[in-house]
Image (cartoon, grey):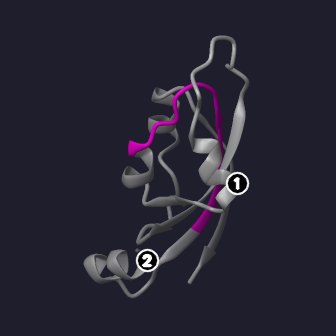
Amino acid sequence: MLEMWCDTMKTSKLYVFRVTVEGHGWFPMDMLRYDRCVPLTELDSNRLNWDGRVGNFEKRQVCLQMYSPHKEGPTKGRWESFGWTVTEVWENAL
């Protein structure tokens, strides 16, 4: 997947971010596409799913890896529009 993004972006520099988001209820799956993110670990992949049982509204954290040609990082306002908060961001340019 990373190779596909690199080819389509045609950029000489690619920024990699580790992002932690926090929220409850349905995970905004479209944010993975929008911010070019993938779950960091298998455990994080499992945290995307929510079984929807009544009363199961505990907040959960999901760690993501983000690939971008821009240094700005994740779109915090868009995450918040879905009821999720970006709590941590680490940057490491490739």
| Rendered residue at 41%/72% (across/down) | 69
Which residue matches tag 2?
A: 2
Comparing marks 2 and 1, which lies closer to the viewer?
1
Residue 9: which numbered mark, if any? none
Drawn side of residue 33 relative to residue 89, left or right: left
SS type, badge 2: helix
| Rendered residue at 59%/28% (across/down) | 51
Identify which amino acid the numbered label 1 is placed on: Leu
Drawn side of residue 15 relative to residue 55, left or right: left
Residue 56 appearing in the image: yes
SS type, badge 1: helix
| Rendered residue at 51%/52% (across/down) | 74
Residues at marks 2 and 1, CA–CA distance in whole angstroms:
20 Å
- Closer to us: 22 or 40: 40
Would you place residue 37 above or below residue 94 in this image? above
Query: In the picture, which quadrant includes the N terminus?
Result: bottom left
Residue 54 appears at what percent x and percent y? 63, 11
Q: Is residue 78 magenta?
A: no
Would you place residue 39 above or below residue 80 in this image? below
For label 2, count other residues whose C-alpha is less than 10 Å away and answer few (under 14), some (14-19) or many (20+). Answer: few
Residue 36 appears at what percent x and percent y? 43, 60
Which residue matches tag 1?
A: 43
Q: Earlier in the sequence, mark 2 or mark 1?
A: 2
The magenta segment: 17-30
Residue 89 appearing in the image: no
Identify which amino acid the numbered label 2 is placed on: Leu
Residue 86 appears at what percent x and percent y? 62, 42
